[in-house]
Amino acid sequence: MAAKNLSIRIDKELLDKIHYVANHNGRSANSEILMLIKDAIKQHEQEHGEIFYKTD
């Protein structure tokens, strides 16, 4: 799967905390955010069933 870019607006305090957690976990902020998103989707699917999507 090809990687795509996504821009988000985030306040400085939250971004600083993400960098702190990422550093603690030995990851970049980007990798930490991806892990958080993947974990949230996994939890959602466990509660509501698998998400199916169409690819282009």
Image (cartoon, rainbow, N blue to C red):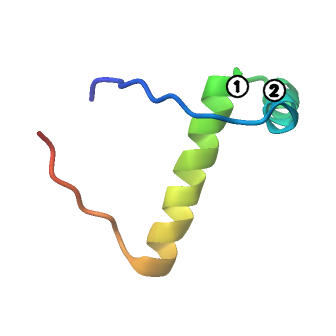
Percent coordinates x, y for residue 45 in the rendering: 44, 69
Q: Is residue 43 left or right of residue 13?
A: left
Q: Which mark is residue 29?
A: 1
Quick one: label 1, few (<14), some, or many (20+) residues within 10 Å? some
Residue at mark 2: 19
Mark 1: which secondary structure? helix
Q: Is residue 23 above or below residue 45?
A: above
Mark 2: which secondary structure? helix
Q: Quadrant of the N terminus?
A: top left
> Image point 50% across, 79% down: which residue?
47
Percent coordinates x, y for residue 4 in the rendering: 36, 25
Q: How many marks?
A: 2
Percent coordinates x, y for residue 48 in the rendering: 43, 79
Percent coordinates x, y for residue 14 in the rendering: 82, 39
- Distance between the Cα atoms at labels 2 and 1? 5 Å
> Image point 56% across, 66% down: which residue?
43
Earlier-in-chain disc, 2 versus 1: 2
| Residue type (three-letter) at the residue carrying disc 2 | His
> Image point 81% across, 26% down: which residue?
19
Q: Which mark is residue 56?
A: none
Q: Quadrant of the C terminus?
A: top left
